[in-house]
Amino acid sequence: MAVIAKSAATIAQLHGSDLLLRPHHTLSVFHPRIWPSALCGNVSKERRGSNWLSKPRGSVLNEHLRQTSLLTVHAVLDTRTELDIVSTYSEIVPDTIIFDDYERYPPTAATVSSSLLLGITSLPKTGFNSAFENALAYGKCYDERTDAARLSCFLTKALVNVGAELSKRVPGRVSTEIDARLAYDVEGIISKVFQLRNLYNESGISADRVLFKIPATWQLEAEGIQTHLTLVYSFSQVSAAAQAGVSVIQLFVGRVREWAQNNTGDKEIEELCKKGVDPGVHLVQKAYNYIHKYGYKTKLIAAAIRNKNDILSLVGLDYLVVPVKILDSLRESNVLLENEDIPRLQLTPHAAQAANFSDDQLKRWDESRFTAALGPLAKELLASGLEGYVSQTRRVEEHIAKVWPPPNV
């Protein structure tokens, strides 16, 4: 499992705010629908992407107020937005590279990656452009003997500069992406991690504010490295990472579901589909139950969220990475707190105790068992994810090669 922190401190405990009761004159209620046939195989695009969870009923209340206009009505409904309620139980992270969105939905934690750097270079001016540009003036990179090494040095420094800036804006940790080209290079990963840590230290950012984002391939543990494991698509990846003491695991709900909708050949996934179980949501729920039943300290992030149902099925997870359009929808939907259909806590350590796991799933992992346990879904998505990360890294380096050296250097 990717270079892992055996003794890493865990992410800060969730800190939900007290419920705030606000007066509103609109009311939304949930009307959930079961659609197991949409989980796998051929599904219409309309049903795959529908947001079916709320229907405004403001017109009913407004009509009532109109009819009683001759009376003095002092009715204050105890309501709250869906976003407020979900945020009480889970940390919400906006899934965006548009920095204006951070003002509307301030994140509590952040990730700096090649994708984020590409976003910075494509925008005319943000608060992070100078952090990127200053990396190109970093003197130690000039000492590298080859163009490839110099570009890698500039890229690494840019990640740290932007990460250091992000650390000033979020109270939690900043995760920094490790070059995906090192995914199967243990010593290379370890060397890159220590290089990043030293650069963060130069920038005045302590090690306890930083995580290192590493693909979930099989690697060795490294003492003291606080790891954010990404590209996780199977329970074997989850359990091996938890056993090794990983700080944070990131799972991708929508990618798993979409693979199941368009592919066959993974027996475990097909069994879930026959039962009408969403394989993406199921993986996250299973991971949560395993971690909390057996006392692991690993935190979980759910990403690739496609609709409200994904969120409502995972309320209580440590972190939910949510597209801004869905956040807008959650913020605009008000629910009566007394309504039985408000978002409910779905995942709890207490409920996890009732989960069942086979003896085989509870065994300690080694590299051969880990590799054999990866099904077609995990193998394919892991490979395509690595390819995407590598492509983004190369694009950033290509941009650096075009603009280096910076002005006035």
Image (spheres, grey):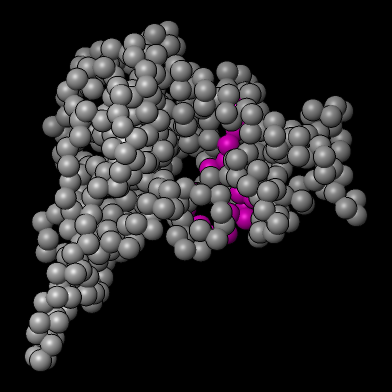
Q: For this view, does 75 lie left or right of residue 95?
A: left
How far across and down, in percent of the image, does residue 389 sit?
A: 59, 30
Which quadrant would residue 124 be assigned to in this image? bottom right
How far across and down, in percent of the image, does residue 146 sit?
A: 85, 27
Which quadrant would residue 370 be assigned to in this image? top left
Which quadrant would residue 261 be assigned to in this image? top left
Which residue is rendered at x = 29% and y = 47% of the image?
Answer: 51
How many numbered marks, from 0 up?
0
Which residue is rendered at x = 41% and y = 42% of the image?
Answer: 10
Work out whether residue 260 or residue 369 is closer to the camera in this orientation and state it. Answer: 260
Work out whether 50 lies above or below 218: below
Which residue is rendered at x = 84% and y = 42% of the image?
Answer: 404
For this orientation, the residue located farthest to the right is 408
Which residue is rendered at x = 88% and y = 53% of the image?
Answer: 407
Work out whether residue 150 or residue 59 is closer to the camera in this orientation and state it. Answer: 59
Work out whether residue 351 or residue 312 is closer to the camera in this orientation and state it. Answer: 312
Question: What segment carries the magenta color?
Answer: 161-180
Instruction: Say if the magenta span includes residue 30.
Output: no
How far across and down, in percent of the image, does residue 157 sit?
A: 71, 43
Asked if one can make out residue 220 in the rendered structure from this viewpoint, the answer is no
Asked if one can make out residue 9 in the rendered structure from this viewpoint, the answer is yes
How far across and down, in percent of the image, does residue 294 sit?
A: 25, 30
Q: For this view, does 386 lie left or right of residue 322?
A: right
Q: For this view, does 394 lie left or right of residue 224?
A: right
